[in-house]
Image: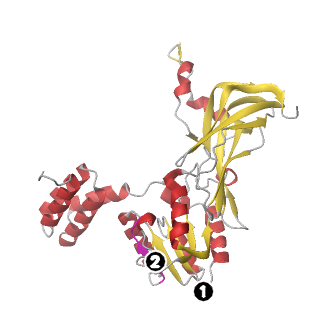
Amino acid sequence: MPHGLSPSSVLEAMAKAAHGDVAKSLSVARACLSAGNTQLAHSLLGDARELAPEHPEIRLLQRQIESQTAPAWHFRIVQDTARNEIYQQAIERAVTPSTRVLDIGAGSGLLSMMAARAGAKEVIACEQDPIVAEAARSVIRANGLADRIRVVAKSSKDLDVDADLGGPVDLIVSEILTNDLLGQDVLAVMDDVRTRLLAPGGAMIPRSAKVLAAPVYWPGLSSRQMDMISGFDLSAFNHLMSAPIAFRANEPFEMKSVPIETLAFDFERSDGVPPRKVQFDVGSKGGSIDGVLQWMRIVLDGDSTYDVLDEHKGRGAWTPQFFPCIPQLSSEPGDIVRLYSLHDNSSASSWVLSDTATNESLQD
């Protein structure tokens, strides 16, 4: 490696030197893939394919990269009919013929196209992955909306309000929430786009979101745990079970208390990280408790709310999360069960410990 050059700089120099040569481009693309630089590899392969459109290795390597670019949730989310309907309704209520819209984390471009169909003056689709951004351009062209929607292949934090957007926008739409609300650095992203890119008086969709939790009995947990295996009791290993566990759609469970709100965030104002409240006491309905179910409720606007647990029964976009209690906890009706909530800037979890049910009543 030349002195003072980083590995990425070396690869970029090699890519530049290989331009116009199919064999060299393939060789450098393989080196890029080995180094984890899939975007440079994809760019090289794209240039090489223009010279050799039917070259099988070029096509296979491109397909390999593309198949690993968009996680499975890209496909699951857009097939969530309830989610699509409430986004469409909220967007239609917010958009006027003068509205300029920014779509953060555009993915396939679905929300951008909803905004264009609702009559927005202009739509900018922000997608940080260049491969996904190019696919979104293809989708938008196929739907005849390329003159209404402009795709910018950048992270939202790198957007320039004037150069990229042509000034502050009137509406920001996004779908970057994870199952526990806080992944993908959502709080920092929302705070940044609101303060830098949204015009005074502008709106955000979604407007707010919260995390809910409740102790539950889930019979399906037993099928995931160790018990007697080959004549040995392995149950003492169960406390190492990975959590959270994605809750399967339509699986039976018994909620053992009313749901409680463990976390709430308003995207339209600067709250920072919500206060960390660790303990929540709830009254048990009685019976066995083997964990806490945690899910998200999203407020799109004043008229539309999406509750993940309700919609999950129809296999919604987001998945409720289950945090096991090992060993199982027994409770009587009226017993207090203490839930523990942990969160930081990037994740949230809700737990119950096996010794947290008491005979003390919440009414006492």
Which residue carries the number 1 mark?
97
Numbered disc 2: secondary structure: loop
As drawn, is 22 to the left or to the right of 323? Answer: left
Which residue: 56% across, 71% down? 172
Q: How is the image coloured?
A: secondary structure
Magenta stretch contains residue 151: yes
Q: Tag 1: Cα neighbours inside 10 Å, few (<14), some, or many (≥20)?
A: few
Numbered disc 1: secondary structure: loop
Q: Quadrant of residue 338?
A: top right
Q: Where is residue 267 drawn, in percent x and y?
A: 61, 62
| Residue nearest the viewer, comparing 123 with 187 | 187
Three-letter amino acid code of the residue under disc 1:
Pro
Magenta stretch contains residue 361: no
Label drawn at residue 165: 2
Q: Where is residue 289 drawn, in percent x and y?
A: 71, 30
Q: Give the CA separation, mark 1 to mark 2.
A: 17 Å
Three-letter amino acid code of the residue under disc 2:
Leu
Does 34 sit above or below residue 121? above
Q: Where is residue 51 drawn, in percent x and y?
A: 18, 71
| Residue nearest the viewer, comparing 149 with 167 | 167
Q: Where is residue 54 drawn, in percent x and y?
A: 22, 67
Q: Which residues are magenta?
A: 148-155
